[in-house]
């Protein structure tokens, strides 16, 4: 299982996450910040848990490219 977490409040809108993992991320037209699709919010952290291990690579590249380091990925 892949777990991806986004701290959306700290997003600066650079769009790298969308470039590396467009199936999981998109940019909000309202505020220009990243949105983690199909995520659940808890205390400012947006999280998805997916059985599809194929999403890990793109999300991990997005996490590494993020200049403010607000994306985390792990396999559990």
Image: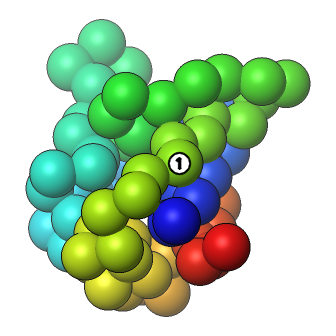
Residue 54 % position (x, y): 25, 76
Q: Quadrant of residue 29?
A: top left
Residue 59 % position (x, y): 37, 71
Image position of 76 with respect to 9: above or below: below
Q: Residue at x 38, y 21 (%)?
A: 31
Outermost residue toward the top?
Answer: 30
Q: How many marks?
A: 1
Image position of 9 with respect to 49: above or below: above
Residue 39 vs residue 45: left or right?
left
Say few, some or many: other residues with alpha carbon within 10 Å of mark 1 (under 14 / 14 to 19 / 20 or more). some
Q: Quadrant of residue 53?
A: bottom left
Image position of 28 with respect to 48: above or below: above
Asked whether 15 or 59 is in front, the reply is 59
Residue 10 appears in the picture as rendered: no
Location of mark 1 (residue): 49
Residue 32 vs residue 64: left or right?
left
Which part of the image, by quadrant, shows the C terminus? bottom right
Residue 46 appears in the picture as rendered: yes
Image position of 37 with respect to 20: above or below: above
Q: Residue at x 51, y 66 (%)?
A: 2
Element type at marker 1?
strand
Q: Residue at x 28, y 47 (%)?
A: 25
Asked whether 1 or 66 is in front, the reply is 1
Q: Quadrant of residue 20?
A: bottom left
Q: Residue at x 59, y 77 (%)?
A: 75
Q: How is the image coloured?
A: rainbow
Residue 52 % position (x, y): 31, 63
Outermost residue toward the right?
Answer: 43
């Amino acid at each position: 299982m892949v777990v991806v977490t986004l701290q959306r409040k700290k997003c600066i809108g650079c769009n790298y996450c969308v470039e590396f993992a467009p199936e999981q991320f998109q940019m909000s037209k309202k505020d220009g910040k990243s949105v983690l699709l199909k995520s659940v919010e808890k205390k400012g952290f947006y999280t998805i848990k997916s059985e599809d291990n194929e999403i890990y690579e793109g999300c991990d590249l997005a996490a590494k490219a993020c200049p403010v380091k607000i994306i985390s990925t792990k396999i559990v």
